[in-house]
Image (cartoon, rainbow, N blue to C red):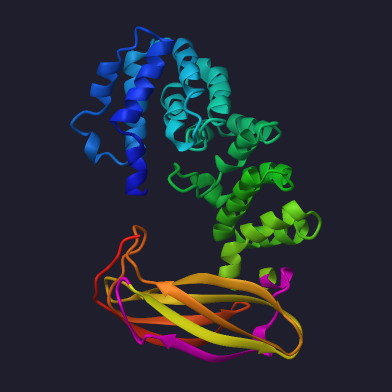
Amino acid sequence: MPDLLKNVYNYNSLQKLAHTIQSAYPPFQADKFLQTTMDETWDKLELKARVRKISTSLAAYLPEDYSRALAILDKAAAVFTNGFFGIFFPDFIEVFGQDEENWDLSMSALERYTQYSTSEFAVRPFIISHEERMMAQMYAWSGHENEHVRRLSSEGCRPLLPWGQALVKYKKDPSPVLPILERLKADPSLYVRKSVANNLNDISKTHPDLVISLAKEWYGKNEYTDWIVKHGCRTLLKKGNREILALFGYHDSASIKVDGFTLEPAAVPMGEDITFSFSISTEEAAKVRLEYAVDYMKANGKRSSKVFQISEITLGRNEKKSCTKKHSFAEMTTRKHYPGVHTITLIVNGAKRERQDFELTAGPGRTR
């Protein structure tokens, strides 16, 4: 997880939380809560560990009775409505609300708290331990009037949710997820549609044939559904899957001509950019999906490839278009660069065309 995100939980923000809870529940020991939470281990804790530390520290100073504790947290949660910060509220449910006698209270609380932050991580242990019952709840949420709750029904059961507890069973068999996606496939909320598309994209990585079948069944009937299908098939598109490319009108690229592919400079210092240019033309009108792959040098001397999209365009008959693209080698938290020979390959409608090598050299890196 990004290092900086964990720093939303700091002394000032936790002090505000403590005082907010104390206003709702005067016996709450705000100073002790802060001391317990921000103890000698705090600075070394990453994001999810900090979230868990907050929720367990809250439990130490709230009433032992679960329903009373939730009533107090409800008042505080309504104050922290700015997104990710309040994720410790559903985490409290995950840790302390899985007992059978607390089920209804926990489901109602997860539904409320996701409207302020997100309960997508907290629902996953419930799915693992009570799959049939919890997936029935997720399906019910898919019909909720609030877009945050509908999104939860999809996001919470993504097989490959980033930062979320693995749903190993759904990696092997995603069929329990499909009724929810079917119900949401034409949702008017972009927030919900993004989640449905991400869920489909997750499934495509382990069950590509299933997603190809769904894409063919769904596409061309509703503009909202079409957006989901296109976004949900992005991994298949990057892999050059011919069936999916054809579904979106990107046919054989043999008739599309690529000329003048150049790279500058031939040697790029780390932290700098490389610029490449080329032109494309066609004798007949065609939809064109332009991508490029970078073969990165790894620490072990081997190389790994990553595909980036340039654009999707339509060329008219005998039309020619020139393209110029910059690619940065600034240091990033998600990728470390190593000197050595790299390669850029142009990809047209899923087919690799021109390629050129260049040297990435040691230089003054920049973090972005």
Q: Toward the viewer: 352 or 135?
A: 352
Vertical placement of 147 versus 306: above or below? above
Quarter of the view holding residue 96: top left
Region in magenta: 245-271
Image coordinates of residue 268 in percent, x first then y, are 33, 80
Q: Is residue 239 visible?
A: no
State the residue at coordinates (65%, 36%).
Answer: 147
x and y percentages locating residue 179 in the rendered image: 70, 43
Q: Is residue 295 left or right of residue 208?
A: left
Q: Nearer the viewer, residue 171 or 154?
A: 154
- Going by the picture, which residue comes out furthest to the left? 40
| Residue found 51% across the figure and 31% down from its top | 126
Residue at the (25%, 29%) spot, across then down: 38
> Residue 185 placed where, x, y %?
72, 48
Please tell me whether residue 280 is drawn above or below residue 71 in the rendered image: below
Instruction: State the residue at coordinates (74%, 47%).
Output: 186
User: Which x, y percent locates residue 307?
Assistant: 50, 71
Q: Is residue 349 above or below residue 279?
A: above
User: Horizontally, is 213 left or right of 33 in the view?
Assistant: right
275 magenta-colored: no
Is 257 a magenta residue? yes
